[in-house]
């Protein structure tokens, strides 16, 4: 495999597709092979998983607890892919207790929300905290068509948020938002009350704000990656996976195929998946042999 695969601190999985198994390579012992598959795969913090035959998707926290996504729109607000979801048996769900905050909420700054049976509109800030916004501030921060970003939340899921009992009446971007100034392409993430330049392109849920609104915050030095905003979907301290330090680590992924009979001469059979994690800095995987 000659393609260069670059990645940062975020874990990713790669699959190796089996090709013709040649007896001349001394691999005859693998054909056929029959073994008992493990009851439950070994998942890692940060993994996404679901029960076979079910639609609910869970996130595994650093404390090895499961937190559910209420629906697809919440899942997409965290820029996640269903291709990364591991399917397990229903019994395996109980290997991981329910998280203290059992449900994952919309990513801060990605949507506006309101209780399904009330009219007050709230912005979502880091830590699952809600701040009520006026119509004027909603228009300044989320555009004149801000209602398109508004989502109803049921009373059951509303309990996963914390109402700060405060009102945001300023035309000032709030923490968690991705914003850019009208007429410009540079995107900034609002963090700790300042604008931090975002590296890369294709940043989702970017709000275009006026020059006057943009100027209400100072621009911090340095920059961040897009993935920085998605590091902790539960928004609970200590729930994000701890970055690995040191060299690259490679291990079998939880979606590695179970042992099975492989007919001699078979091609296109998935037989190995592995996880690669960078250390304290970005790394480059150049070849798999």
Image (cartoon, grey):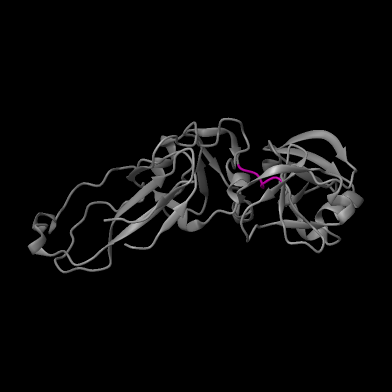
Q: In this orientation, which residue lies closer to the viewer: 282 or 162?
A: 282
Query: On the image, which quarter does residue 262 sit in?
Result: bottom left
In the depicted structure, whether residue 21 falls above or below residue 169: below
Q: Report the quarter where the C terminus lies.
A: bottom left
Tell me what residue is drawn at x 38 percent, y 42 percent.
248
Bounds of the magenta segment: 104-108
Residue 160 screen position, x and y as percent: 67, 38
Residue 193 screen position, x and y as percent: 78, 38
* Left or right placement of residue 107 versus residue 47 in this view: right
* Left or right placement of residue 51 versus residue 155 in this view: left
> Does the image show residue 224?
yes
In the depicted structure, whether residue 268 falls above or below residue 155: below
Tell me what residue is drawn at x 90 percent, y 52 percent.
212
Query: On the image, which quarter does residue 238 sit in?
Result: top right
Residue 12 screen position, x and y as percent: 44, 50
Tell me what residue is drawn at x 16 percent, y 52 percent.
34
- Examine the structure image and report whether residue 106 is included in the region drawn in magenta: yes
Q: Report the quarter where the N terminus lies.
A: bottom left
Q: In this orientation, which residue lies closer to the viewer: 111 or 67?
A: 111
Give the dominant element type of the magenta stretch: helix, strand or loop. loop
- Examine the structure image and report whether residue 214 is included in the region drawn in magenta: no
Considering every residue shown, the one lying at the far front of the view is 221
């Amino acid at each position: 495999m000659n393609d260069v695969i670059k990645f940062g601190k975020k874990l990713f999985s790669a699959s190796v597709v089996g090709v013709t198994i040649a007896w001349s390579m001394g691999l005859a012992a693998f054909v056929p092979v029959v073994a008992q598959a493990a009851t439950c795969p070994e998942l890692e913090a940060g993994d996404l998983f679901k029960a076979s035959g079910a639609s609910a998707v869970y996130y595994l926290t650093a404390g090895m607890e499961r937190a559910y996504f209420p629906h697809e729109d919440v899942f997409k607000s965290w820029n996640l892919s269903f291709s990364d979801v591991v399917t397990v048996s229903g019994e395996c769900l109980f290997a991981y207790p329910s998280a203290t905050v059992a449900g994952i909420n919309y990513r801060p700054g990605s949507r506006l929300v309101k209780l399904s049976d009330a009219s007050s509109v709230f912005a979502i800030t880091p830590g699952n905290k809600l701040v009520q916004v006026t119509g004027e501030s909603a228009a300044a921060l989320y555009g004149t068509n801000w209602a398109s970003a508004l989502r109803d939340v049921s009373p059951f899921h509303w309990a996963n948020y914390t109402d700060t009992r405060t009102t945001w009446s300023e035309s000032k971007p709030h923490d968690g938002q991705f914003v850019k100034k009208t007429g410009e392409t540079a995107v900034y993430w609002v963090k700790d009350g300042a604008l931090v330049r975002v590296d890369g392109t294709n940043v989702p849920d970017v709000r275009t704000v006026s020059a006057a609104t943009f100027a209400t915050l100072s621009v911090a030095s340095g920059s961040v990656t897009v993935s920085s905003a998605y590091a902790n979907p539960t928004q609970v301290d200590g729930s994000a996976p701890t970055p690995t330090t040191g060299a690259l680590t490679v291990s079998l992924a939880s979606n590695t195929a179970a042992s099975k009979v492989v007919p001699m001469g078979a091609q296109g059979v998935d037989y190995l998946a592995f996880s690669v994690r960078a250390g304290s800095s970005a790394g480059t995987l150049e070849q798999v042999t």
